[in-house]
Image (cartoon, grey):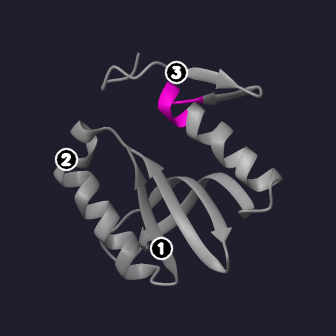
């Protein structure tokens, strides 16, 4: 169990942080096979705060899934209602949206 009581789940030999995330992966794989989406990736890192003078390291947002849908680049995250209310998540989401406007940000609940 994770700190938010999600149960790690294995699908296709891949360990996911939650059953919901594993189920979404399976759905996205079906969409990819059908040609609805392309370039499906998981756990893609996006730099939201570069290493600078006082910062000892860069900071990243790790997206659950990234893919293209009809020419649109998509960042998708599977989040529980509890996680969506967290200030840290809200800040990271805002930073990703500001720094990567070429992507559409989607939350899957």
Task: Residue 19 in the image: state x and y as whole percent.
Answer: 51, 25
Label 2 and label 1: CA atoms lie apart by: 21 Å
Instruction: Kindly tell me whether residue 58 is visible in this rendering.
Output: no
Image location of residue 47, percent across then percent down: 48, 69
Q: Which residues are magenta?
A: 16-21
Q: As rendered, which of 30 and 3 lies closer to the eye?
A: 30
Residue at the disc numbered 3: 8
Identify residue for label 2: 86
Q: Residue 17 colored magenta?
A: yes
Q: Quadrant of residue 34?
A: bottom right
Element class at badge 2: loop
Circle 1 sits in a helix, a strand or a loop, which is it? strand
Quadrant in the rendering for residue 91: bottom left
Lower position in the chain sequence, tag 3 or tag 1? 3
Which of marks 3 and 2 precedes in the sequence? Answer: 3
- Residue 19 in magenta? yes
For residue 27, which quarter of the picture?
Answer: top right
- Tell me if residue 101 comes above or below residue 41 in the rendering: below
Q: Quadrant of the C terminus?
A: top left
Q: With 67 as the anchor, is 103 left or right in this view?
A: left
Measured as percent of width and height from the top left, residue 9 is found at 58, 21
Disc 3 element: loop
| Residue behind mark 1 | 104
Crowdedness of circle 3 by 10 Å Cα count: few (<14), some, many (20+)? some
Q: Earlier in the sequence, mark 2 or mark 1?
A: 2
Query: Which residue appears at 76% of the width and 25% of the height?
Result: 13
Quadrant occupied by the N terminus: top left
Query: Within 10 angstroms of label 1, few (less than 14), some, or many (20 or more) residues?
Result: some
Which mark lies nearer to you, 2 or 1?
1
Q: Nearer the viewer, mark 3 or mark 1?
A: 1
Is label 2 in contact with label 1 (beta carbons under 8 Å)?
no
């Amino acid at each position: 169990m994770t700190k938010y009581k999600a149960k790690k789940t294995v699908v296709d030999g891949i360990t996911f942080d939650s059953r919901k995330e594993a189920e979404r992966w399976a759905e996205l794989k079906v969409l990819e096979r059908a040609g609805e989406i392309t370039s499906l990736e998981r756990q893609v890192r996006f730099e939201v705060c570069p290493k600078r003078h006082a910062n000892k390291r860069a900071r990243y947002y790790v997206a659950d899934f990234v893919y293209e849908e009809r020419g649109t680049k998509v960042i998708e995250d599977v989040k529980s209602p509890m996680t969506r209310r967290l200030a840290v998540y809200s800040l990271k989401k805002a930073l990703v949206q500001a720094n990567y406007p070429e992507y559409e940000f989607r939350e899957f609940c």
